[in-house]
Amino acid sequence: MRKTAFFFILLWSVAFSAFAGPDDLKKCLRFKAPDQQSVITTPVCTLGVDSSCKKIEKVEIRARYCPYGSDTLIETTIGTLSSPPFLKVWDLSGIPDQLTIGIGVLIIVNFSDGDAFGLHREGIFLAHQSLSSPLAQQISYEYAGTKEFHADTIRFNPSNAGVYAFARMYWNEKGITVMVNVRDTMLDTSASQKILEQTGIEILIDPAKKQRPYPTDDIMRFFVPLAGKPHRVTYQPIFNDGRTYQLKQATVPGNFDYSVRTGNRGGFAVVFSIPRYLFGKSLPLEMGYNIIARASNAKTLSLVNSGNGYNHYSPLLWPSLTLLPKPLFKARWLILLVSFFTGFLIPLLAYVMFFALTKDKPRVILIRGQEAEKRAFEKVKEALDRYVLLRDMSPAEIAPELNMSPEQLETSVKKITGLSFMNYVMYLRTEIVRERLRSSFSSEASIAESCGFQSIKEMERYFKRFHHMTPQNFRKMQQVTQQTQ
């Protein structure tokens, strides 16, 4: 969190001291404004002052807040009053929600005898706009160490700078694992250490789902940089003598299970596990959460569309995260218990059959769906045919050409073909491999490389999956070209 807010607090403290007067003025002046920690949900807010000991001549009211699309604080004059009642109704319609650091109000009172006095208050929060958070997310149980699994993709708010990000999560007895992929064409892996330390992923958790406007000491915030080790940030909100408010932060190092993978001009991927012991005796079934991706071009992508950067850290805006129950077939103790009572072989065969039936088995690709969907998919198929041989092809590469988001492209391919995007790409590549095996004498290594596979092993794995035989056996059976002696 930037130090801009604390600079303004210090500046206002100096201004307050300059206007400070005798103690009796403090007793006779009354600050008519919301109390500290108040959350204003109405479209207007009344600010003002009255005096019981001296006649007021003029009152100036100033406020400090974040404008739209910025996390840089500004100070503005709300109004100057020269006649009683010294009250100002502040129209909040043009101001975004002010959470996390809130607003500050300074009222400068000038008396008829020439004395002046300043009243200052921080830590007032505005939630007057229509609050909306992303839909609640449900995450499933997976074994520890899993890095690929079938789950709903968590979508980030889109960036207008060509940066895309999506995340997936799962839970188990060891904690919660978060996987985030960021498509960042501006990423330079040879950049300075400072830039790489500021680029990465932030994961925020509200375990008790208290949904306060500002983060408290029980909020979990983890930062995983591209350079350096992950660390946790703790908060300590301090409200002093009814006037000032500070949100102190401290960095706590930790031994976390994580991995970071970067690709120059391509983006980065982060896998990070939040250990269970940080949650207490057990994982809560429901909690608040947010994920923030910090790209190399200083662009920020968040699950929360908050209007300014500070509000990303307000638990009041975070969506809910719910843990789905652990499936019975993933309870190893249950399988062992059944095996003990009914014998070993029968349960083992049943488990193998169940796994085989539920696995995402390859099948002949059929174009399914309505005619309109088929016609729309033809454009997708044409684009895939053009890029299918590119080794690093991804939805982010093709989606802009089709005026689709990467998530929409993946959904379209899944709906029409029954396969995920990458599995369908691999299927198309094996079809090309079939033709080259049938009509040429090129080596398998050459064919694998020219068809976009990372290695011969990868080509053989997908070929066997979709065509139920090895490339070598297929060539023996289907080759039609005679080798020249």
Image: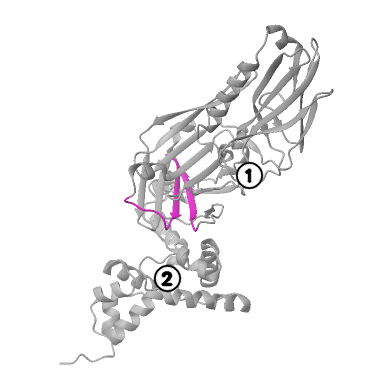
**Start-end of magenta stretch:** 162-190
Whole-number angstrom distance, CA of label 1 to CA of label 2: 42 Å
Q: Left or right of 412: which side holds 339? A: left
Q: Secondary structure at mark 2?
A: helix
Three-letter code for the amino acid on which mark 1 is drawn: Tyr
Q: Residue furthest front?
A: 114
Foreground of the two, 14 or 464: 14
Which quarter of the figure is the C terminus placed in?
A: bottom left
Q: Residue furthest left?
A: 485
Q: Which residue is mark 1?
A: 68
Relative to 347, does residue 451 appear above or below in the rendering? below
Q: Nearer the viewer, mark 1 or mark 2?
A: 1
Q: Position of residue 224 (x, y in %)?
A: 41, 42
Q: Secondary structure at mark 1?
A: loop
* Labelled pair 1, 2 in contact (Cβ < 8 Å): no
Foreground of the two, 72 or 365: 72
Q: Which residue is mark 2?
A: 425
